[in-house]
Protein backbone atom coordinates (compact mmCIF):
# COMPACT_ATOMS: atom_id res chain seq x y z
CA UNK A 1 0.00 0.00 0.00
CA UNK A 2 1.32 3.48 -0.89
CA UNK A 3 1.88 5.61 2.20
CA UNK A 4 0.09 8.90 2.73
CA UNK A 5 3.38 10.78 2.51
CA UNK A 6 4.20 9.14 -0.83
CA UNK A 7 0.71 9.96 -2.08
CA UNK A 8 1.25 13.60 -1.24
CA UNK A 9 4.69 13.61 -2.81
CA UNK A 10 3.58 11.95 -6.05
CA UNK A 11 0.55 14.20 -6.28
CA UNK A 12 2.81 17.24 -6.46
CA UNK A 13 5.40 15.89 -8.89
CA UNK A 14 5.04 15.85 -12.65
CA UNK A 15 7.62 13.89 -14.61
CA UNK A 16 8.63 15.32 -17.95
CA UNK A 17 10.17 13.45 -20.86
CA UNK A 18 11.57 15.00 -24.01
CA UNK A 19 9.67 13.65 -27.02
CA UNK A 20 9.40 14.40 -30.68
CA UNK A 21 7.24 11.77 -32.39
CA UNK A 22 3.46 11.25 -32.43
CA UNK A 23 2.69 8.80 -29.64
CA UNK A 24 5.61 9.87 -27.46
CA UNK A 25 4.87 10.46 -23.79
CA UNK A 26 5.54 14.11 -22.89
CA UNK A 27 4.71 14.14 -19.17
CA UNK A 28 2.65 12.37 -16.55
CA UNK A 29 1.20 13.35 -13.21
CA UNK A 30 -0.01 11.10 -10.43
CA UNK A 31 -3.58 11.94 -9.37
CA UNK A 32 -5.01 9.45 -6.91
CA UNK A 33 -5.09 5.99 -5.36
CA UNK A 34 -8.63 4.68 -4.94
CA UNK A 35 -9.53 1.90 -2.50
CA UNK A 36 -12.12 -0.86 -2.86
CA UNK A 37 -14.65 0.74 -0.50
CA UNK A 38 -14.59 4.01 -2.45
CA UNK A 39 -14.98 2.11 -5.73
CA UNK A 40 -17.99 0.18 -4.42
CA UNK A 41 -19.67 3.38 -3.19
CA UNK A 42 -18.98 5.19 -6.46
CA UNK A 43 -20.45 2.35 -8.52
CA UNK A 44 -23.61 2.34 -6.41
CA UNK A 45 -24.03 6.08 -6.99
CA UNK A 46 -23.25 5.89 -10.72
CA UNK A 47 -25.38 2.81 -11.28
CA UNK A 48 -28.58 4.18 -9.82
CA UNK A 49 -29.71 0.75 -8.65
CA UNK A 50 -28.18 -1.25 -11.49
CA UNK A 51 -26.01 -4.13 -10.39
CA UNK A 52 -22.23 -3.86 -10.61
CA UNK A 53 -19.73 -6.64 -9.86
CA UNK A 54 -17.57 -6.48 -6.76
CA UNK A 55 -14.29 -4.67 -7.49
CA UNK A 56 -11.19 -6.86 -7.52
CA UNK A 57 -8.41 -4.27 -7.82
CA UNK A 58 -7.68 -0.89 -6.28
CA UNK A 59 -6.91 1.89 -8.75
CA UNK A 60 -4.19 4.43 -9.43
CA UNK A 61 -4.88 7.33 -11.79
CA UNK A 62 -2.58 9.57 -13.81
CA UNK A 63 -3.14 12.39 -16.23
CA UNK A 64 -0.72 12.40 -19.14
CA UNK A 65 0.33 14.62 -22.01
CA UNK A 66 1.50 13.04 -25.23
CA UNK A 67 2.57 14.00 -28.71
CA UNK A 68 0.08 13.80 -31.54
CA UNK A 69 -0.21 15.78 -34.74
CA UNK A 70 -2.60 18.19 -36.42
CA UNK A 71 -4.26 17.63 -39.78
CA UNK A 72 -1.32 19.42 -41.41
CA UNK A 73 1.17 17.02 -39.83
CA UNK A 74 2.67 19.39 -37.27
CA UNK A 75 3.16 18.11 -33.73
CA UNK A 76 0.43 18.80 -31.20
CA UNK A 77 0.34 17.95 -27.49
CA UNK A 78 -2.82 16.15 -26.34
CA UNK A 79 -3.89 14.91 -22.92
CA UNK A 80 -5.82 12.10 -21.32
CA UNK A 81 -6.56 10.15 -18.16
CA UNK A 82 -5.09 6.73 -17.32
CA UNK A 83 -6.72 4.45 -14.72
CA UNK A 84 -4.57 1.47 -13.70
CA UNK A 85 -5.42 -1.67 -11.67
CA UNK A 86 -2.89 -1.90 -8.87
CA UNK A 87 -0.78 -5.03 -9.35
CA UNK A 88 2.89 -5.48 -10.18
CA UNK A 89 2.51 -9.24 -10.74
CA UNK A 90 -0.19 -9.31 -13.44
CA UNK A 91 -0.50 -8.05 -17.02
CA UNK A 92 -3.82 -6.51 -18.03
CA UNK A 93 -5.63 -5.59 -21.28
CA UNK A 94 -5.90 -1.96 -22.37
CA UNK A 95 -9.41 -0.53 -22.69
CA UNK A 96 -9.58 2.79 -24.52
CA UNK A 97 -12.86 4.47 -23.59
CA UNK A 98 -13.96 7.42 -25.71
CA UNK A 99 -16.18 9.79 -23.74
CA UNK A 100 -19.43 11.44 -24.77
CA UNK A 101 -19.81 15.07 -25.79
CA UNK A 102 -18.21 17.41 -23.30
CA UNK A 103 -17.78 21.04 -24.21
CA UNK A 104 -16.19 22.53 -21.09
CA UNK A 105 -12.40 22.37 -21.02
CA UNK A 106 -12.47 21.98 -17.25
CA UNK A 107 -14.50 18.77 -17.65
CA UNK A 108 -11.91 16.95 -19.77
CA UNK A 109 -11.20 13.52 -18.23
CA UNK A 110 -7.59 14.47 -17.48
CA UNK A 111 -8.82 17.48 -15.50
CA UNK A 112 -11.73 15.80 -13.71
CA UNK A 113 -10.17 12.43 -12.94
CA UNK A 114 -12.50 9.71 -11.67
CA UNK A 115 -14.92 12.14 -10.07
CA UNK A 116 -18.59 12.09 -9.10
CA UNK A 117 -18.84 15.29 -11.13
CA UNK A 118 -18.55 13.14 -14.28
CA UNK A 119 -20.49 9.92 -13.71
CA UNK A 120 -19.74 8.52 -17.18
CA UNK A 121 -15.98 8.56 -16.63
CA UNK A 122 -16.29 7.47 -13.01
CA UNK A 123 -18.54 4.50 -13.81
CA UNK A 124 -16.36 3.24 -16.66
CA UNK A 125 -13.13 3.89 -14.79
CA UNK A 126 -14.28 2.25 -11.57
CA UNK A 127 -15.95 -0.73 -13.25
CA UNK A 128 -13.38 -1.35 -15.96
CA UNK A 129 -10.22 -0.76 -13.96
CA UNK A 130 -11.31 -2.57 -10.81
CA UNK A 131 -12.10 -5.57 -13.03
CA UNK A 132 -8.61 -5.69 -14.50
CA UNK A 133 -8.54 -3.32 -17.49
CA UNK A 134 -5.96 -0.57 -17.90
CA UNK A 135 -8.61 2.01 -18.75
CA UNK A 136 -7.58 5.09 -20.72
CA UNK A 137 -9.63 8.16 -21.57
CA UNK A 138 -8.37 10.38 -24.41
CA UNK A 139 -9.49 13.99 -23.94
CA UNK A 140 -9.54 14.40 -27.77
CA UNK A 141 -7.98 17.18 -29.81
CA UNK A 142 -8.84 20.59 -28.41
CA UNK A 143 -10.71 19.31 -25.33
CA UNK A 144 -9.12 20.66 -22.17
CA UNK A 145 -6.99 23.03 -24.25
CA UNK A 146 -8.14 26.67 -24.05
CA UNK A 147 -5.94 27.59 -27.00
CA UNK A 148 -7.48 25.15 -29.46
CA UNK A 149 -10.87 24.02 -30.77
CA UNK A 150 -12.20 20.47 -30.82
CA UNK A 151 -12.78 18.92 -34.30
CA UNK A 152 -16.19 17.54 -33.33
CA UNK A 153 -17.16 14.50 -35.41
CA UNK A 154 -14.09 14.68 -37.62
CA UNK A 155 -12.97 11.07 -38.10
CA UNK A 156 -9.22 11.51 -38.39
CA UNK A 157 -8.91 13.61 -35.23
CA UNK A 158 -10.21 10.72 -33.12
CA UNK A 159 -7.92 8.22 -34.81
CA UNK A 160 -4.89 10.34 -33.94
CA UNK A 161 -6.00 10.98 -30.36
CA UNK A 162 -6.67 7.30 -29.61
CA UNK A 163 -3.75 5.70 -31.46
CA UNK A 164 -1.19 8.11 -30.06
CA UNK A 165 -2.52 7.82 -26.51
CA UNK A 166 -2.29 4.03 -26.59
CA UNK A 167 1.36 4.36 -27.62
CA UNK A 168 2.00 6.90 -24.86
CA UNK A 169 0.41 4.70 -22.19
CA UNK A 170 2.71 1.85 -23.18
CA UNK A 171 5.62 4.23 -22.63
CA UNK A 172 4.16 5.20 -19.26
CA UNK A 173 4.44 1.57 -18.15
CA UNK A 174 8.21 1.82 -18.67
CA UNK A 175 8.54 5.10 -16.75
CA UNK A 176 6.80 4.18 -13.50
CA UNK A 177 8.89 2.45 -10.85
CA UNK A 178 8.37 0.30 -7.77
CA UNK A 179 4.81 -0.32 -6.66
CA UNK A 180 3.49 2.06 -9.31
CA UNK A 181 4.64 -0.14 -12.21
CA UNK A 182 2.07 -1.85 -14.40
CA UNK A 183 2.14 -4.18 -17.38
CA UNK A 184 -0.17 -4.39 -20.39
CA UNK A 185 -0.74 -7.57 -22.38
CA UNK A 186 -1.59 -8.01 -26.06
CA UNK A 187 -5.31 -7.31 -25.75
CA UNK A 188 -6.86 -4.00 -26.83
CA UNK A 189 -10.51 -3.07 -26.36
CA UNK A 190 -12.29 0.03 -27.66
CA UNK A 191 -15.56 1.39 -26.30
CA UNK A 192 -17.46 4.67 -26.18
CA UNK A 193 -20.90 6.22 -25.98
CA UNK A 194 -22.51 9.06 -27.97
CA UNK A 195 -19.65 11.16 -29.39
CA UNK A 196 -17.51 8.41 -27.90
CA UNK A 197 -19.40 5.81 -29.92
CA UNK A 198 -18.54 7.73 -33.08
CA UNK A 199 -14.94 8.17 -31.87
CA UNK A 200 -14.69 4.45 -31.13
CA UNK A 201 -15.83 3.39 -34.58
CA UNK A 202 -13.61 6.05 -36.17
CA UNK A 203 -10.57 4.87 -34.20
CA UNK A 204 -11.35 1.24 -35.03
CA UNK A 205 -11.50 2.02 -38.74
CA UNK A 206 -8.20 3.90 -38.57
CA UNK A 207 -6.45 1.14 -36.64
CA UNK A 208 -7.74 -1.66 -38.88
CA UNK A 209 -7.04 0.17 -42.12
CA UNK A 210 -3.74 1.88 -41.29
CA UNK A 211 -2.25 0.55 -38.03
CA UNK A 212 -3.00 -3.19 -38.14
CA UNK A 213 0.70 -4.01 -38.09
CA UNK A 214 0.98 -2.42 -34.64
CA UNK A 215 -2.39 -2.99 -32.97
CA UNK A 216 -4.78 -5.92 -32.89
CA UNK A 217 -8.21 -4.98 -31.57
CA UNK A 218 -9.66 -7.75 -29.40
CA UNK A 219 -13.20 -6.35 -29.55
CA UNK A 220 -14.87 -2.98 -30.14
CA UNK A 221 -18.04 -1.61 -28.55
CA UNK A 222 -19.38 1.53 -30.29
CA UNK A 223 -22.52 2.76 -28.53
CA UNK A 224 -25.17 5.27 -29.63
CA UNK A 225 -22.97 7.16 -32.07
CA UNK A 226 -23.85 9.35 -35.06
CA UNK A 227 -22.13 7.11 -37.60
CA UNK A 228 -24.39 8.07 -40.51
CA UNK A 229 -23.70 11.81 -40.52
CA UNK A 230 -24.59 12.42 -44.17
CA UNK A 231 -27.81 10.40 -44.10
CA UNK A 232 -29.61 9.76 -40.82
CA UNK A 233 -28.27 12.84 -39.03
CA UNK A 234 -28.92 15.27 -41.91
CA UNK A 235 -32.48 13.96 -42.24
CA UNK A 236 -32.97 14.22 -38.48
CA UNK A 237 -31.75 17.81 -38.23
CA UNK A 238 -33.77 18.94 -41.24
CA UNK A 239 -36.99 17.26 -40.10
CA UNK A 240 -36.96 18.11 -36.39
CA UNK A 241 -37.43 21.80 -35.52
CA UNK A 242 -36.66 21.17 -31.83
CA UNK A 243 -33.79 19.06 -30.49
CA UNK A 244 -32.96 17.82 -27.03
CA UNK A 245 -29.47 19.37 -27.27
CA UNK A 246 -29.47 21.95 -30.08
CA UNK A 247 -25.89 23.02 -29.33
CA UNK A 248 -24.72 19.85 -31.13
CA UNK A 249 -25.67 21.41 -34.49
CA UNK A 250 -23.43 24.52 -34.50
CA UNK A 251 -20.76 22.45 -32.74
CA UNK A 252 -20.56 20.15 -35.78
CA UNK A 253 -20.88 22.94 -38.34
CA UNK A 254 -18.25 25.28 -36.87
CA UNK A 255 -15.86 22.38 -36.26
CA UNK A 256 -16.07 21.26 -39.86
CA UNK A 257 -15.66 24.81 -41.18
CA UNK A 258 -12.59 25.43 -39.01
CA UNK A 259 -11.06 22.02 -39.70
CA UNK A 260 -11.41 22.09 -43.48
CA UNK A 261 -11.26 25.84 -44.23
CA UNK A 262 -9.19 27.23 -41.37
CA UNK A 263 -9.76 29.23 -38.21
CA UNK A 264 -9.63 32.50 -40.13
CA UNK A 265 -12.69 31.58 -42.23
CA UNK A 266 -15.30 34.34 -42.27
CA UNK A 267 -18.33 32.81 -40.53
CA UNK A 268 -20.52 35.46 -42.19
CA UNK A 269 -20.36 33.19 -45.25
CA UNK A 270 -22.53 30.66 -43.40
CA UNK A 271 -24.32 32.23 -40.45
CA UNK A 272 -26.60 35.15 -39.70
CA UNK A 273 -24.52 38.16 -38.56
CA UNK A 274 -25.26 37.81 -34.83
CA UNK A 275 -24.24 34.16 -34.82
CA UNK A 276 -21.24 34.70 -37.07
CA UNK A 277 -19.99 37.14 -34.46
CA UNK A 278 -20.79 35.07 -31.35
CA UNK A 279 -20.37 31.38 -32.17
CA UNK A 280 -16.60 31.40 -31.72
CA UNK A 281 -16.86 32.72 -28.17
CA UNK A 282 -19.75 30.37 -27.33
CA UNK A 283 -17.61 27.37 -28.29
CA UNK A 284 -14.41 28.48 -26.56
CA UNK A 285 -14.56 25.77 -23.89
CA UNK A 286 -15.85 28.02 -21.09
CA UNK A 287 -19.60 27.68 -21.74
CA UNK A 288 -21.63 24.59 -20.84
CA UNK A 289 -23.93 22.81 -23.25
CA UNK A 290 -27.01 23.97 -21.34
CA UNK A 291 -25.75 27.55 -21.40
CA UNK A 292 -25.32 27.39 -25.18
CA UNK A 293 -28.70 25.67 -25.58
CA UNK A 294 -30.40 28.53 -23.74
CA UNK A 295 -28.79 31.11 -26.01
CA UNK A 296 -29.80 29.45 -29.30
CA UNK A 297 -33.05 30.19 -31.18
CA UNK A 298 -36.01 27.81 -30.89
CA UNK A 299 -35.10 26.38 -34.29
CA UNK A 300 -31.33 26.10 -34.24
CA UNK A 301 -31.16 26.04 -38.04
CA UNK A 302 -32.23 29.70 -37.95
CA UNK A 303 -28.60 30.55 -37.19
CA UNK A 304 -27.77 29.72 -40.81
CA UNK A 305 -28.17 32.16 -43.68
CA UNK A 306 -31.31 31.32 -45.65
CA UNK A 307 -29.25 30.76 -48.79
CA UNK A 308 -26.92 28.35 -46.96
CA UNK A 309 -29.81 26.38 -45.47
CA UNK A 310 -31.53 26.10 -48.85
CA UNK A 311 -28.36 24.86 -50.53
CA UNK A 312 -27.58 22.53 -47.63
CA UNK A 313 -31.08 21.06 -47.88
CA UNK A 314 -31.14 20.57 -51.63
CA UNK A 315 -27.56 20.11 -52.79
CA UNK A 316 -25.48 17.12 -51.69
CA UNK A 317 -22.40 18.85 -53.13
CA UNK A 318 -22.73 21.78 -50.74
CA UNK A 319 -19.54 22.17 -48.68
CA UNK A 320 -20.95 21.10 -45.30
CA UNK A 321 -22.81 18.19 -46.87
CA UNK A 322 -19.49 17.07 -48.36
CA UNK A 323 -17.64 17.24 -45.04
CA UNK A 324 -20.41 15.27 -43.34
CA UNK A 325 -20.19 12.65 -46.08
CA UNK A 326 -16.41 12.47 -45.70
CA UNK A 327 -16.81 11.75 -41.99
CA UNK A 328 -19.61 9.21 -42.29
CA UNK A 329 -18.33 5.85 -41.01
CA UNK A 330 -20.12 3.36 -43.27
CA UNK A 331 -17.83 2.65 -46.22
CA UNK A 332 -15.63 -0.10 -44.79
CA UNK A 333 -15.93 -3.56 -43.23
CA UNK A 334 -14.82 -4.03 -39.61
CA UNK A 335 -12.47 -6.96 -39.05
CA UNK A 336 -12.45 -7.18 -35.24
CA UNK A 337 -15.50 -8.39 -33.30
CA UNK A 338 -17.72 -5.29 -33.24
CA UNK A 339 -20.76 -4.87 -31.01
CA UNK A 340 -23.05 -1.94 -31.81
CA UNK A 341 -25.41 -0.80 -29.03
CA UNK A 342 -28.23 1.71 -29.24
CA UNK A 343 -31.43 2.49 -27.37
CA UNK A 344 -34.46 2.60 -29.65
CA UNK A 345 -35.91 5.47 -27.59
CA UNK A 346 -32.80 7.61 -28.10
CA UNK A 347 -33.97 11.22 -28.28
CA UNK A 348 -30.68 12.78 -29.40
CA UNK A 349 -28.91 10.34 -31.74
CA UNK A 350 -31.47 8.26 -33.69
CA UNK A 351 -30.92 4.52 -33.34
CA UNK A 352 -31.13 4.21 -37.13
CA UNK A 353 -27.45 5.24 -37.13
CA UNK A 354 -26.55 1.86 -35.66
CA UNK A 355 -29.02 -0.09 -37.79
CA UNK A 356 -27.67 1.45 -41.00
CA UNK A 357 -24.07 0.93 -39.87
CA UNK A 358 -24.80 -2.73 -39.13
CA UNK A 359 -26.52 -3.25 -42.48
CA UNK A 360 -23.71 -1.52 -44.39
CA UNK A 361 -21.00 -3.48 -42.63
CA UNK A 362 -22.69 -6.75 -43.46
CA UNK A 363 -23.14 -5.68 -47.07
CA UNK A 364 -19.45 -4.74 -47.18
CA UNK A 365 -18.49 -8.26 -46.13
CA UNK A 366 -18.04 -8.00 -42.36
CA UNK A 367 -18.96 -11.25 -40.63
CA UNK A 368 -18.10 -10.36 -37.04
CA UNK A 369 -20.46 -7.44 -36.38
CA UNK A 370 -23.41 -7.57 -34.00
CA UNK A 371 -26.24 -5.18 -33.14
CA UNK A 372 -28.12 -4.88 -29.86
CA UNK A 373 -31.02 -2.45 -29.64
CA UNK A 374 -32.04 -1.66 -26.09
CA UNK A 375 -35.82 -1.46 -25.45
CA UNK A 376 -37.75 1.75 -24.86
CA UNK A 377 -37.83 0.98 -21.15
CA UNK A 378 -34.15 1.93 -20.87
CA UNK A 379 -35.16 5.49 -21.76
CA UNK A 380 -33.56 8.15 -23.92
CA UNK A 381 -29.99 8.94 -24.88
CA UNK A 382 -28.71 9.86 -21.42
CA UNK A 383 -30.42 7.16 -19.39
CA UNK A 384 -29.40 4.39 -21.81
CA UNK A 385 -25.67 5.03 -21.35
CA UNK A 386 -25.07 2.87 -18.27
CA UNK A 387 -27.27 -0.05 -19.47
CA UNK A 388 -25.39 -0.02 -22.78
CA UNK A 389 -22.02 -0.11 -21.08
CA UNK A 390 -23.06 -2.84 -18.64
CA UNK A 391 -24.14 -5.03 -21.55
CA UNK A 392 -20.89 -4.30 -23.38
CA UNK A 393 -18.88 -4.90 -20.21
CA UNK A 394 -20.40 -8.36 -19.81
CA UNK A 395 -19.16 -9.36 -23.26
CA UNK A 396 -15.84 -7.62 -22.75
CA UNK A 397 -15.02 -9.76 -19.73
CA UNK A 398 -15.72 -12.89 -21.80
CA UNK A 399 -12.80 -11.88 -24.03
CA UNK A 400 -10.56 -10.63 -21.23
CA UNK A 401 -7.24 -12.29 -20.41
CA UNK A 402 -5.12 -11.42 -17.37
CA UNK A 403 -1.63 -12.91 -17.40
CA UNK A 404 0.83 -13.80 -14.68
CA UNK A 405 4.59 -14.05 -15.02
CA UNK A 406 5.72 -17.38 -16.40
CA UNK A 407 2.73 -17.83 -18.73
CA UNK A 408 4.96 -17.59 -21.80
CA UNK A 409 2.44 -19.07 -24.25
CA UNK A 410 -0.33 -16.78 -22.88
CA UNK A 411 -2.84 -19.60 -22.38
CA UNK A 412 -3.75 -18.68 -18.81
CA UNK A 413 -1.90 -21.53 -17.09
CA UNK A 414 1.76 -22.23 -16.32
CA UNK A 415 3.01 -25.62 -17.51
CA UNK A 416 6.19 -27.29 -18.69
CA UNK A 417 5.35 -25.96 -22.15
CA UNK A 418 6.02 -22.45 -20.83
CA UNK A 419 9.35 -23.65 -19.48
CA UNK A 420 10.22 -25.05 -22.91
CA UNK A 421 9.25 -21.78 -24.61
CA UNK A 422 11.33 -19.74 -22.18
CA UNK A 423 14.28 -22.08 -22.59
CA UNK A 424 14.13 -21.66 -26.37
CA UNK A 425 13.92 -17.87 -25.98
CA UNK A 426 17.02 -17.82 -23.79
CA UNK A 427 19.12 -20.25 -25.83
CA UNK A 428 18.26 -18.83 -29.25
CA UNK A 429 18.20 -15.19 -28.14
CA UNK A 430 14.93 -14.55 -29.99
CA UNK A 431 13.77 -11.00 -30.57
CA UNK A 432 10.82 -10.66 -28.21
CA UNK A 433 8.28 -8.00 -27.25
CA UNK A 434 8.36 -6.10 -23.98
CA UNK A 435 5.34 -8.13 -22.84
CA UNK A 436 7.12 -11.43 -23.58
CA UNK A 437 10.18 -10.16 -21.73
CA UNK A 438 7.97 -9.34 -18.73
CA UNK A 439 6.36 -12.79 -18.82
CA UNK A 440 9.76 -14.48 -18.77
CA UNK A 441 11.23 -12.38 -15.96
CA UNK A 442 9.74 -14.42 -13.12
CA UNK A 443 12.20 -13.20 -10.46
CA UNK A 444 12.00 -9.50 -11.38
CA UNK A 445 15.70 -9.06 -12.17
CA UNK A 446 15.02 -7.42 -15.56
CA UNK A 447 16.23 -10.41 -17.62
CA UNK A 448 15.24 -13.96 -18.50
CA UNK A 449 17.71 -16.62 -17.39
CA UNK A 450 18.09 -20.02 -15.75
CA UNK A 451 16.70 -18.71 -12.47
CA UNK A 452 13.41 -17.93 -14.19
CA UNK A 453 13.34 -21.48 -15.60
CA UNK A 454 13.76 -22.84 -12.08
CA UNK A 455 10.92 -20.65 -10.81
CA UNK A 456 8.60 -21.94 -13.54
CA UNK A 457 9.54 -25.50 -12.55
CA UNK A 458 8.67 -24.72 -8.94
CA UNK A 459 5.31 -23.24 -9.96
CA UNK A 460 4.47 -26.31 -12.07
CA UNK A 461 5.42 -28.67 -9.25
CA UNK A 462 3.31 -26.74 -6.74
CA UNK A 463 0.29 -26.75 -9.05
CA UNK A 464 0.69 -30.48 -9.75
CA UNK A 465 1.09 -31.18 -6.06
Image (tube, rainbow, N blue to C red):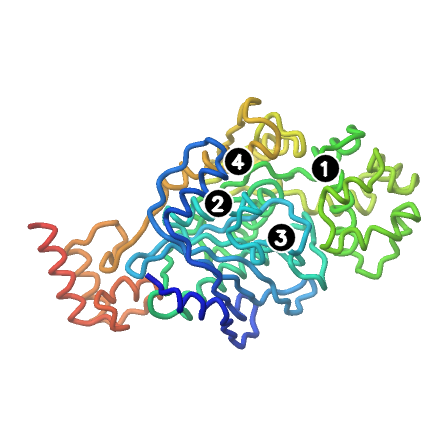
- State the separation of the CA atoms marked 4 and 2: 17 Å
Q: Residue, x 75% and y 51% (percent of image)?
A: 256
Q: Residues within 10 Å of mark 1 (few under 14, many from 20)?
A: some
Numbered disc in front, either 4 or 2: 2
Q: Nearer the viewer, residue 282 or 66?
A: 282
Picture quadrant of residue 69: bottom right
Q: Which-is-in-front pick, marks 1 and 3? A: 3
* Front-lying residue, 369 or 289: 289
Q: Along the horizontal axis of the image, is 380 left or right of 173?
A: right
Residue 370, image x, y percentages: 49, 33
N-term mark: 4 or 3: 3
C-beta proximity under 8 Å, tags 4 and 2: no
Residue 124 got which mark? Answer: 2
Q: Nearer the viewer, mark 4 or mark 3?
A: 3
Residue at label 4?
Answer: 340
Element type at mark 4: strand
Q: Would you say residue 171 is visible in this rendering?
A: no
Q: Earlier in the sequence, mark 4 or mark 2?
A: 2
Element on which disc 2 rests: helix
Instruction: Kindly identify which residue carries mark 3.
Output: 107
Q: Nearer the viewer, mark 1 or mark 4?
A: 1
**Label 2 vs label 3, nearer the camera:** 3
Instruction: Assess whether mark 2 and mark 1 are in contact (beta carbons under 8 angstroms).
Output: no
Cα distance in 3D space between marks 1 and 2 = 23 Å
Q: Residues within 10 Å of mark 4 (few under 14, many from 20)?
A: many
Q: Earlier in the sequence, mark 2 or mark 3?
A: 3
Q: What is the x, y in percent for residue 27? A: 53, 70
Q: Are marks 4 and 3 in contact (CB under 8 Å)?
A: no
* CA–CA distance in space, label 4 to label 3: 27 Å
Mark 3 or mark 1, which is nearer the start of the sequence? 3
Provide the residue designation for mark 1: 245
Mark 2 Cα-neighbour bin, 10 Å: few <14, some 14–19, many ≥20: many
Amino acid sequence: MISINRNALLFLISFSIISSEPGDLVSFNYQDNIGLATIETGLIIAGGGLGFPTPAYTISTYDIKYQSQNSNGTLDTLSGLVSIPNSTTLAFPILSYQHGTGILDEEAPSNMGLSLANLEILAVGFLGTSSGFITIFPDYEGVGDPDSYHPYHVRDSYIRAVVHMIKAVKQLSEELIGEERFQYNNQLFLAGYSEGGYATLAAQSGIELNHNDEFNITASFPMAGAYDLSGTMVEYFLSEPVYENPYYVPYVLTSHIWYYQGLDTDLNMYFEPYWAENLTSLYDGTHSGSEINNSLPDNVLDILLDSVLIEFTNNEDQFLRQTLAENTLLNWAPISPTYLYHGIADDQVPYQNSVIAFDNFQTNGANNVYLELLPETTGGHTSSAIPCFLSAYSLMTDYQNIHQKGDIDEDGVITLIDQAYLSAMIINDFEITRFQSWLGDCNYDEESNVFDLLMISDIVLMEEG
